[in-house]
Image (cartoon, helix red, strand yellow):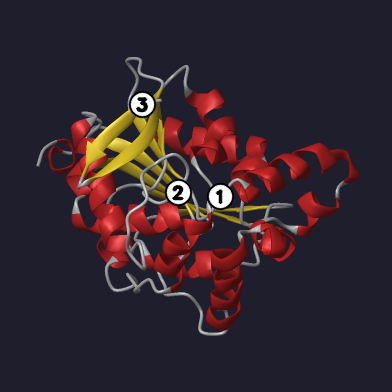
């Protein structure tokens, strides 16, 4: 199980290696690097695919803190990119992974070749969501995720995925993966609930950027993606039918096509000196 010491913690990662340009995959809250298995499978023949677990999630170490904040996760990821010799990389972040990617692109653009933001927003958690999410997190802290797994599934997945009789086996798999979370996942959840805005920073992003959102995302609604697209100069927006907040597994072929087209469009573009050195 590959582990890397970064920023005072131990991060689990998987690296396909190979000679292609590196892509770093950064998952969403309550998941792990498994969230991007369909994308890694599709792209590993042409790119060096690296997927990792955030501190406090998956198989990475858990800190003894009340809240794993986004600034710490940002520094973890910067350290990971540098230690793995993966600069400049194509960064793909979903939800919480997008919170990290936006910070890197705005502050350390020399580390990135491009930025893909899936089901994410530069804003803090909407005020109306905070009491509900805080209650769910409190229950999970006391009893684990089993008592709250059904409402969490409705947040994480769109109605098409949840209602399709042909996808019952997939739903069971992802439900089981939710239940695999340790009780101390509450530390990571607090970091998401309490995150600060980066809306004032994202207009400074100049690396090529793709924004992807599922039409059925109820956690980060499409209007949030539209706003993010407007804030980042020159960004490309793709809206996916039938996808919710976990689009990488709900509609993997559509996500693969969007990423593949975006990355291919950059394959003949020169790497700017600013992006290549720093």
Left/right placement of residue 108 relative to residue 115 reads left
Where is residue 93? Give x, y as percent.
44, 48
Left/right placement of residue 147 relative to residue 186 reads right
**Which class describes the residues within 10 Å of circle 2: few (<14), some (14-19), or many (20+)?**
many
Q: Which mark is residue 181?
A: 1
Q: Nearer the viewer, residue 277 or 208?
A: 277
Relative height, residue 104 to residue 199 (above, below): above
Q: Earlier in the sequence, mark 3 or mark 2?
A: 3
Left/right placement of residue 192 relative to residue 224 reads left
CA distance separating discs 1 and 3? 20 Å
Residue hosting label 2: 57
Image quadrant where one finds the N terminus: top left
Residue hosting label 3: 2
Q: Earlier in the sequence, mark 1 or mark 3?
A: 3
**Which class describes the residues within 10 Å of circle 1: few (<14), some (14-19), or many (20+)?**
many
The residue depicted at 57 percent of the width and 84 percent of the height is 128
Per the image, label 2 sits on a secondary structure element best described as: loop
């Amino acid at each position: 199980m590959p582990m890397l010491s970064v920023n005072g913690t131990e991060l689990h990662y998987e690296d396909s290696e190979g000679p292609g340009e590196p892509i770093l995959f950064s998952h969403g809250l309550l998941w792990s690097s498994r969230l991007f298995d369909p994308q890694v499978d599709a792209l590993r023949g042409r790119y060096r695919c690296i997927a990792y677990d955030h501190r406090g999630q998956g198989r990475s170490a858990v800190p003894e803190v009340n809240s794993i904040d986004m600034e710490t996760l940002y520094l973890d990821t910067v350290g990971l990119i540098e230690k793995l010799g993966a600069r400049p990389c194509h960064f793909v972040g979903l939800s919480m992974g997008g919170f990290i990617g936006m910070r890197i692109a705005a502050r350390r653009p020399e580390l990135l070749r491009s930025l893909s933001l899936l089901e994410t927003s530069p804003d803090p958690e909407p005020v109306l969501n905070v009491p509900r999410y805080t209650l769910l997190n409190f229950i999970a802290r006391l009893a684990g995720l089993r008592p709250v797994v059904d409402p969490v599934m409705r947040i994480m997945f769109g109605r098409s995925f949840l209602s399709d009789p042909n996808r019952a086996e997939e739903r069971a798999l992802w439900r089981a993966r939710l239940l695999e979370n340790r009780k101390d996942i509450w530390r990571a959840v607090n970091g998401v609930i309490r995150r600060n805005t980066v809306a004032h920073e994202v207009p400074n992003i100049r690396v090529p950027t793709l924004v992807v959102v599922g039409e059925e995302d109820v956690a980060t609604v499409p209007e949030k993606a539209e706003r993010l697209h407007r804030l980042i100069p020159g960004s490309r927006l793709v809206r996916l039918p039938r996808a919710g907040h976990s689009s990488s597994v709900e509609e993997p072929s559509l996500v693969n096509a969007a990423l593949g087209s975006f990355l291919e469009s950059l394959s003949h573009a020169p790497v700017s000196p600013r992006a290549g050195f720093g």
